[in-house]
Image (spheres, rainbow, N blue to C red):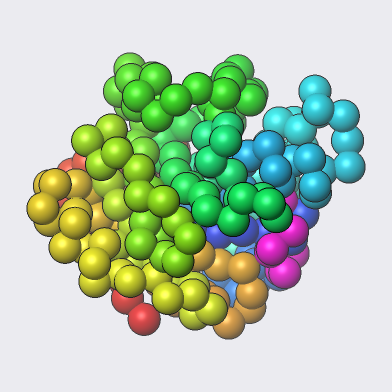
């Protein structure tokens, strides 16, 4: 079986992340993971606060951190794929606006992140969903019933994160799973890794399900052959 992490943050990509890319590679090797989907926060609030560079360089910095993690993990034969945990403009978490929504975007390549850049978050959910349909991407709302999170339009999503392993939040995973069943949505599980002890969730896929790139991972999710790893 292949063991995949679907939700992970690094210290240089998200200020809430506390672990370096180098250390993450070692931790995930010891925990027996086959692959990681890199999902640092991708929204205006994080870029404005945490990225000490010009706006035109925000997306490059995001992709460069992905490359850094991929390089370190290659030493342990762990695959690393591009992903995003994005908030659409106006839905990001800010000091004066604590209610927010986040979408895990799977299947997008590093080249596509550079191509679309900030346009990914400067549109409404319907337009993003239609673009995802064209490109074969998967949109999954992360921790949809966590406190202060606003549930999105489930008809314009492909899935819900029904098992979020972050131990510092009440994620109401059972409620998310019931909603995924009701709307017949893809179910995902992820550690929501920020700190060393967060590791432990994710998804198992059979060895015959080939996952070598971002498109492969999106197809693997659509196949619904994945098994949720819960704490």
Residue 226 percent across, percent down from the top left = 23, 57
Residue 223 percent across, percent down from the top left = 18, 44
Tell me if residue 25 comes above or below residue 117 in the rendering: below
Question: Quadrant where the N terminus lies?
Answer: bottom left
**Within the magenta stretch, is there residue 218?**
no
Residue at left offset 63%, top offset 39%: 43
Q: Camera-side residue: 159 or 206?
A: 159
Residue 11 left/right relative to 26? right
* Main SS, magenta residues: loop
Point out the stretch of residues depicted in magenta.
13-21
**Within the magenta stretch, is there residue 18?**
yes
Q: Camera-side residue: 127 or 39?
A: 127
Residue 190 percent across, percent down from the top left = 41, 63
Q: Is residue 186 visible?
A: yes
Residue at the far front: name it: 96
Residue at left offset 76%, top offset 33%: 58
Q: Is residue 212 visible?
A: no
Question: Quadrant where the C terminus lies?
Answer: bottom left
Q: Quadrant of residue 105?
A: top left
Residue 76 percent across, percent down from the top left = 60, 63
Residue 168 left/right relative to 73? left
Tell me if residue 139 comes above or below residue 116 in the rendering: below
Report the number of discs: 0
Residue at left offset 19%, top offset 56%: 179
Q: Quadrant of residue 113?
A: top right
């Amino acid at each position: 079986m292949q063991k995949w992490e679907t939700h992970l943050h690094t210290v240089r990509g998200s200020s809430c992340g506390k672990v370096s890319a180098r250390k993450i590679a070692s931790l995930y090797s010891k925990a027996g993971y086959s692959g990681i989907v890199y999902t640092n926060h991708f929204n205006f609030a994080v870029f404005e606060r945490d990225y000490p560079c010009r706006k035109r360089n925000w997306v490059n910095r995001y992709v460069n951190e992905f490359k850094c993690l991929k390089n370190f993990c290659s030493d342990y034969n762990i695959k690393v794929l591009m992903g995003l945990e994005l908030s659409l403009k106006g839905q990001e978490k800010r000091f004066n606006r604590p209610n927010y929504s986040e979408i895990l975007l799977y299947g997008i390549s590093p080249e596509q992140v550079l191509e679309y850049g900030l346009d990914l978050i400067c549109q409404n959910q319907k337009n993003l969903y239609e673009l995802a349909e064209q490109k074969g991407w998967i949109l999954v709302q992360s921790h949809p019933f966590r406190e202060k999170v606003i549930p999105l339009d489930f008809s314009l999503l492909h899935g819900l994160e029904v098992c979020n392993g972050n131990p510092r939040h009440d994620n109401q995973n059972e409620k998310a799973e019931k909603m995924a069943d009701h709307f017949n949505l893809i179910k995902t599980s992820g550690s929501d890794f920020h700190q060393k002890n967060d590791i432990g969730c994710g998804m198992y896929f059979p060895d015959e399900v080939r996952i070598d790139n971002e498109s492969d991972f999106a197809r693997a999710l659509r196949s619904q052959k994945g098994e949720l790893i819960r704490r």
